[in-house]
Image: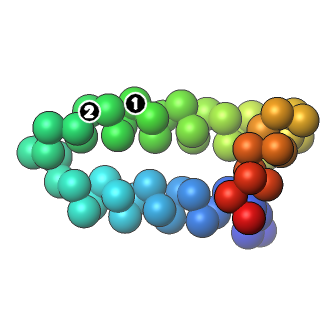
Amino acid sequence: MPDMFDAYQKALTQLRAALGSGHPDYGDVLLYEQRLTENMRSARRFGDTEILARRAGAGH
């Protein structure tokens, strides 16, 4: 079932593809992608915290 994090996952995939593995910041992208993926997994499993919910709402 789609949720509010699907757009983030799609954008991460697009960013990785656009940069390519030879880009000097590619390692940083992988690190941030891992952190964001872990946070999304936790939010899906246990629900958002107030801080995460505010961050997600700040972009809207």
Residue linked to disc 1: 31
CB of mark 1 within 8 Å of CB of mark 2? yes
Q: Position of residue 25 (x, y in %)?
A: 23, 38
**At numbered mark 1, what does the secondary structure look like: helix, strand or loop?**
helix
Q: How many numbered badges does the structure rendering display? A: 2
Q: Which residue lies under the disc numbered 2? A: 27
Q: Is residue 7 above or below residue 39?
A: below
Tell me, for residue 19, which label it has, or none. none
| Residue at horizontal 27 percent and vertical 61 percent from the top | 17
Q: Residues within 10 Å of mark 1 (few under 14, many from 20)?
A: few
Alpha carbons under labels 1 and 2: distance apart: 6 Å
Vertical placement of 33 versus 2: above or below?
Answer: above
Vertical relation: 49 (above or below) 59: above
Question: In the rendered structure, which amino acid carries the disc numbered 1?
Answer: Leu
Q: Residue at x 40, y 59 (%)?
A: 13
27 and 1: which is toward the camera: 27
